[in-house]
Image (cartoon, helix red, strand yellow):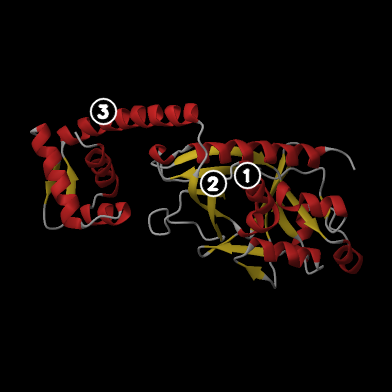
């Protein structure tokens, strides 16, 4: 059986649409229909019941779906293992990263990686918008939070603390909030992504928890701009530890509420599928884990 047909079958079962699955995989709808019919002919079973309004998986299809996923996962793990043993880091890698991480942290790491592996070329996409791997032709993406799409490969890179911070100039002008509840009387710099406004900040101290709805006269869809506003004394920011570690060290930003903890954020390296986990992806994964661990350790050291 053709592994592409099997992958298509899984995608159709998840989307409930031949047209949408074809679009995601970059093929035509007729080609997807032909592949599905070919698979059904090889199995001698009907995998889906087709009507003019819907596509519904059959009982036989559900049983085959379970084994199909296991088989492809085992095969992809074998391919990944083979690539790891080969260890050839080369070719083009299309890499998407969020704005602040890309501009201020990952940028020199990319140069270091390319210096170490001269046969590697990088196509770097810096944006806070979540990449569509199929439409944007992205190989890997570095993003906060584990994706909801279970078909993706998500490599955990680091667990990173959230820190509330502002500039010394803001504190000298408006005073220092001593408790998270005091944030209601301050200008809190906000971030919006895909229509969602992140205006609830959370804190715990011993057994007490606080979920504060904050407000601001400044909102951006670019995390780097939010940080620059904080450094310029325009308000208070709620950022990941590694995003602001260098600014804390230089004194451009100061941490608020050191006795309170906020929910950490998880950093993941995302890849569309295991068959695309090449030696270059593996090398990037290990480099990112090492660099992030170093930054977190440095941030924890007393100044």
**Between residues 213 and 115, which one lies in front from this camera angle?**
115
* Mark 2: few/some/many CA within 10 Å (<14, 14-19, 20+): some
- Residue 39, compared with residue 175, is above or below; it is above
Q: Image quadrant for the C terminus? A: top right
Q: Residue 236: name its quadrant.
A: bottom right
**Residue under label 2:** 120
Q: Residue 48: name its quadrant.
A: top left
* Mark 3: few/some/many CA within 10 Å (<14, 14-19, 20+): few
Which badge, 1 or 3, is on the more N-terminal residue?
Answer: 3
Disc marking residue 113: 1
* Mark 1: few/some/many CA within 10 Å (<14, 14-19, 20+): some
**Residue under label 3:** 67
- Residue 237, compared with residue 8, is above or below; it is below
**In the displayed structure, does residue 97 sit left or right of residue 135?**
right
Q: Which residue lies at the image location 43% right of the left edge and 59% below the top edge?
A: 136
Could you tell me how far apart the alpha carbons at marks 2 and 3 are, in whole angstroms?
36 Å
Task: Tell me where residue 30 appears, x and y as whole percent.
Answer: 15, 56
């Amino acid at each position: 059986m053709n592994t592409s047909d099997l992958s298509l079958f899984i995608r159709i079962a998840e989307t409930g649409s031949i047209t949408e699955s074809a679009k995601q995989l970059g093929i035509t709808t007729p080609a997807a229909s032909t592949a599905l019919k070919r698979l059904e002919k090889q199995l001698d079973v009907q995998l889906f019941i087709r009507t003019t309004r819907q596509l519904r998986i059959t009982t036989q299809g559900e049983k085959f779906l379970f084994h199909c996923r296991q088989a492809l996962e085992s095969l992809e793990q074998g391919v990944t293992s083979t690539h790891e043993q080969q260890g050839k880091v080369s070719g083009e890698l299309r890499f998407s990263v969020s704005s602040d991480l890309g501009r201020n942290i990952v940028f020199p790491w990319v140069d270091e990686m390319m210096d170490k592996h001269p046969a590697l070329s990088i196509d770097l996409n810096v944006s806070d918008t979540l990449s569509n791997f199929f439409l944007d032709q992205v190989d890997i993406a570095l993003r906060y939070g584990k994706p909801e799409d279970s078909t993706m490969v998500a490599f955990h890179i680091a667990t990173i603390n959230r820190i509330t911070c502002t500039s010394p100039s803001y504190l000298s002008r408006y005073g220092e909030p001593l408790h998270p509840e005091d944030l209601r009387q301050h200008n809190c710099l906000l971030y919006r992504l895909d229509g969602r406004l992140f205006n609830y900040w959370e804190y715990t101290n011993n057994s007490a928890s606080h979920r504060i709805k904050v407000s601001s006269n400044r909102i951006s869809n670019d995390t780097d701009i939010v940080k620059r506003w904080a450094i310029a004394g325009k308000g208070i920011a709620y950022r990941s530890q590694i995003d602001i570690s260098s600014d804390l060290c230089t004194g451009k930003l100061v941490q608020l509420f050191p006795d309170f903890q906020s929910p950490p954020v998880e950093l993941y390296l995302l890849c569309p599928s295991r068959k695309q986990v090449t030696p270059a992806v593996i090398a990037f994964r290990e480099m990112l884990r090492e660099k992030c661990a170093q930054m977190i350790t440095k941030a924890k050291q007393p100044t």
